[in-house]
Image (cartoon, rainbow, N blue to C red):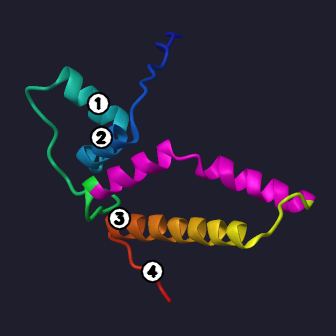
Amino acid sequence: MAKRPAPFSLWLTFEQRARLERDAGDMSLSAYVQSRLFDSDNPPPRRRGKRPVKDHQALAQVLGLLGQSRLSSNLNQLARSANSGSLPVTPDTEAALMMAAADVQEIRRLLIEAMNLEVGP
């Protein structure tokens, strides 16, 4: 039985990954990267992706900002503090939480718009 070669890993930014997924269209990322590396004289046909994206630049920007943020870590710390009773709810704390919730809603809106999705009521 022939031994398979070891997989190859590559670290990408969120923006680079979003661009690759957009350019790959219906192809898997692996097949697309292989075709670009080893058959660059004959580029793959441009096909519409499985998930139509309205604005790739906006999507890459939002994903980049999410990757740079500490949003999940901060929310986890807030939940832990709230569950233990050590989170004092002052007017400043409440205002900060409301602002964070508004930011999350705006991120959601931007992602939905960038992915050209419709959300029901």
Residue 98, picture quadrant = bottom right
Q: Secondary structure at mark 3?
A: loop
Q: Earlier in the sequence, mark 3 or mark 1?
A: 1
Residue 91, picture quadrant = bottom right
In the displayed structure, does residue 86 sit left or right of residue 13? right
- Mark linked to residue 20: 2
Q: Position of residue 59 (x, y in %)?
A: 34, 56
Q: For the residue marked with disc 2, what is the amino acid? A: Leu
In the picture of the structure, the residue carrying the numbered disc 3 is 115
Q: For the residue marked with disc 1, what is the amino acid? A: Val
Residue drawn at x 59%, y 69% as measured from the top left: 101
Q: Earlier in the sequence, mark 1 or mark 4?
A: 1
Q: Secondary structure at mark 2?
A: helix
Q: Earlier in the sequence, mark 2 or mark 3?
A: 2
**Residue most extreme to the left:** 41
In the picture of the structure, the residue carrying the numbered disc 4 is 119
Q: For the residue marked with disc 3, what is the amino acid? A: Met
Q: Nearer the viewer, mark 3 or mark 1?
A: 3
Q: Residues within 10 Å of mark 2 (few under 14, many from 20)?
A: some
Marks 2 and 3 sit apart, C-alpha to C-alpha, by 15 Å
Query: Does the CB distance between marks 3 and 1 fall below 8 Å?
Result: no
Q: Residues within 10 Å of mark 3 (few under 14, many from 20)?
A: some
Q: Which residues are magenta?
A: 58-84
- In terms of secondary structure, what is the magenta stretch mainly? helix
Residue drawn at x 58%, y 65% as measured from the top left: 100
In the picture of the structure, the residue carrying the numbered disc 1 is 33
